[in-house]
Amino acid sequence: MERNLNGRAVWRICTGVVVASALAACADSPPSGPVLSSPRTLVPLQRLLKMNPGQNERWGGVDVVFAEVAKKAPSFAGAYYDKSDREGQMIVRMSNMSEAASAEQALREIIARTPRRLSTITFVPAALSFLTLSDWRDTLFLTAPAGLVYTIDIDKESNRVDVGVKNEDGIAAIRAIADRASIPDSAWSAHLAPEPGLRASLTDRTRPVRGGIIHRPGPLGGAYCSVGVNGEWQFSSTYRGFLTASHCTVSYLQLDAGTTYTFQNSLTSSDSLAYEFDDPTYFTGGACPSSARCRYSDVAFYRYLNGSNSGLGTIARTTYSDSGAPGSTTISGHFTVVGDWPYSFLYEQLQKVGATSGWTYGSTTATCQTHLAEAGSPNYYILCSDDSKLWSDAGDSGAPVFKWYGGSDTTVYWAGILWGGPVVGGQIDRTVTWHSPRWNIDLELTGAYGWYWN
């Protein structure tokens, strides 16, 4: 099966917020320390955040948080940052305002375990709870004809399930499913979505190898991708390597047969860098349509041939960043990763460094959105990715996505791995990017608890 490394996927963003009363204030300053405090006493994110993914197997990313809040406040309908203040002012939707206090307590307790700012919460009425919308999202996705759905997610702002489909017949099919399941028209929307495709200078030979620079998977010929984050598999320097996109390997969403090498940056033996070591196998059933193959992340792990080449715990920093255009690809230093940013809320601002378009920044436009990654027989889906306005291009696949508080600070929090964006009319829409959130990577790559630590 061939894959196009020059594109990928779809977007959506809706508006309409009713302002209610603001409650309780808390610290509005940058976090004082990392989420994970010690390189040798790390624990899985699920245990650290006191959330068990086995209890929330339908969800990933920030939707895991929402499912936890809904245990304390069943009428909780979602949360996102105010567009005018992406660093602290949060909008929380509730279908029953009498449970607002319980929702706020649960949400603050979870957010307090991450390096995230939260100053005030504004509660806004919603017609439908998160749990209700989750059930209806699953119904629409799992019963739709094969290959019809390109994207699907719960739009936290418009309080409905949003479905991106292949054609006009797709809209009619979604409507028929909704009618049979008694899902009201106000609870869902469907639109034609861009054709999916994968998005496979910071391009010079560089040692040590830091996140964001180029690597060239040998079997893919002239195509190239980006190094994500470096780490040690289960804390062993013997297994030092880096994360990148799974579609930058031979066998998508599964470990390659034989040994697949990647190079940095020429396809010569002297530049042999690493080989694919782990790429969890896709699954079917459960949250995945029975005729499809699914993963919660488009991520694989490459093991270094020589671990001393690794810039462990660092991401390349270039001379400047940009939004809505490519950033600099001239390396001027590096960022040091000091903790996790396991999930993102709507409208949070993130950064990325990729081999093609360099250092760029932009805000999230959708959270936990499922995408058709590869159409065919079978269809491949990546569940629960986050969308953003990060500028990206072909070759940025695998790049690290991270949170940076700006200024002279050189420390960052790792948020995920970039893997795609829309293709419109055969052309890459570089203004929209998709990434697998850190939480989902931790969920699937079970040894991935200490990627960036020295």
Image (cartoon, rainbow, N blue to C red):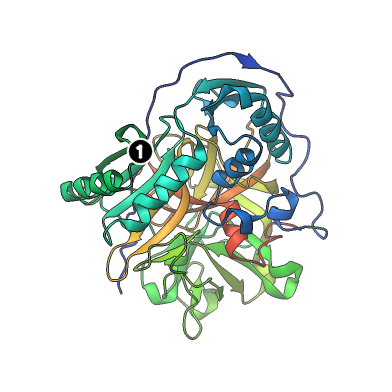
User: Which one is nearer the viewer's eye here, 390 or 14?
Assistant: 14
- Residue marked by disc 1: 12
Residue at 75% across, 67% down: 235
Judging depth in this view, the residue of 107 and 172 nearest the camera is 172
What is the quadrant of the C terminus in the image? Answer: bottom right
Picture quadrant of residue 120:
top right
What count of labels does the image hold?
1
Image quadrant in which the N terminus is located: bottom left
Residue 366 visible somewhere in the drawing: yes
In the foreground, 113 or 450: 113
Of all residues, the one furthest to the bottom in this rendering is 258
Q: Using the image, determine if residue 313 lies above or below residue 29.
A: below
Q: What's the residue at 16%, 46% (across, down)?
A: 168
Residue ID at (51%, 68%): 264
Horizontal and vertical percent position of residue 85:
55, 22
Please identify the quarter of the rendering in which residue 148 is found: bottom left
10 Å crowding of disc 1: few (<14), some (14-19), many (20+)? some
Can residue 429 be spotted in the picture?
Answer: no
Please say if 385 is above or below 96: below
